[in-house]
Amino acid sequence: MNLKVWIQAARLRTLPLAISNMAMGNGLAAIDGKFSWMIALLSIGTAVSLQILSNFSNDYGDSIHGADSIERTGPLRAVQSGDILPAQMRTAMMFWSVISLILGTALIFVALDGMLLRLIFLVLGLIAIWASINYTAGSKPYGYSGKGDISVFFFFGILAVLGCYYLQTNSLSWDVILPAISCGALSVGVLNLNNIRDISSDKKAGKMSIPVRIGYDAAIQYHGMLLIVAIVSALAYVFANYVHPGQFLFLLTAPILWWQYVQIQHVVASKELDPFLKKLALTTALFVLLFLLGHLLFL
């Protein structure tokens, strides 16, 4: 078994995005004076395992459904290339499903009291596992009908941030939804770039992503809208909790996001979009870091 192939299939460049969103929820709880390292580490571990599960499932699902064909402009996938057999990938998907369930269950029992709350979060965790697998795998993958953006926005933004915040504090505050929207919008941005890059092969495979539905130019404009939503939502949170100008520290990422957007508009070949996925994921991590530092240091 070639370990390098499995590491490539896990798509490590996507992990900073998953970690960042969980860090936002845990960090917001720390800002409010409630934080447990055990809960933070378990939540991040759960997110990473779910992301790896999603990446393996995507590799498997797009290969068996035809989206990963020789016409695809992105990196060659492991099942598509034959480096990993479909049966091997299914086994890996099962393994990471179990790991996600174990970590998620441990998180729930460490963070929560009461069987009803634990049951609610357990159901949400099972739904997250199902969503990770069925984005492109399964008989009716919802990613092929254009619902991937909604799923990413909910699981990477709303559920990740609000869920972590609640697990740390056992409470919710209305304004926490604002940075959750920021995380969700930036995460959808990464997915959108991926889908714009693959628009030609996805269309031929019947994968009706948002870019396939609305076209290349409109998808670029949609991407710009997602970046604006992310910045505006974070600004709204700061204005609702304003104490010190240092809270605007995250705005240092705005010129980076804008420059990336300008460069994306001038891309000639769709394969040239691939580096921007990593750039946006890393910029999102910087966005979250500066947002949290701006509040932890100056409040």
Image (tube, grey):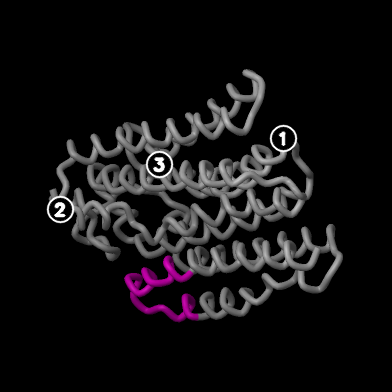
Q: Which residues are magenta?
A: 263-279
Main SS of the magenta segment? Answer: helix
Please report whichever mark, 3 or 2, sits nearer to the chain's N-terminal start: 2
Residue 154 makes an appearance in the image: no
Give the percent coordinates (x, y) of residue 73: 28, 65
Mark 2 neighbour density, 10 Å: few (under 14) some (14–19) many (20 or more): few
Above-or-below relation of 20 to 262: above
Q: Name the one closer to the observer, 151 or 241.
A: 241
Q: Name the one closer to the observer, 196 or 107.
A: 107
Q: Which residue is mark 1?
A: 170
Q: How many marks?
A: 3
Please report whichever mark, 3 or 1, sits nearer to the chain's N-terminal start: 3
Q: Which residue is mark 2?
A: 2
Q: Is residue 277 magenta-colored?
A: yes
Give the percent coordinates (x, y) of residue 80: 19, 51
Side of 59 where 161 appears, left or right: right
Circle 3 or circle 2, nearest the eye: 2
Which residue is at a point 63% across and 44% down the rendered structure image?
Answer: 36
Give the percent coordinates (x, y) of residue 282: 49, 67
Which residue is at a point 65% across and 77% down the rendered structure image?
Answer: 252
SS at circle 3 = loop
Q: Quadrant of residue 224?
A: bottom right
Q: Which residue is mark 3?
A: 135
Q: CA distance from mark 3 to mark 1?
A: 30 Å
Circle 3: residue type: Tyr
Residue 63 makes an appearance in the image: yes
Q: What is the quadrant of the C terminus in the image? A: bottom right
Q: Are marks 3 and 1 in contact (CB under 8 Å)?
A: no
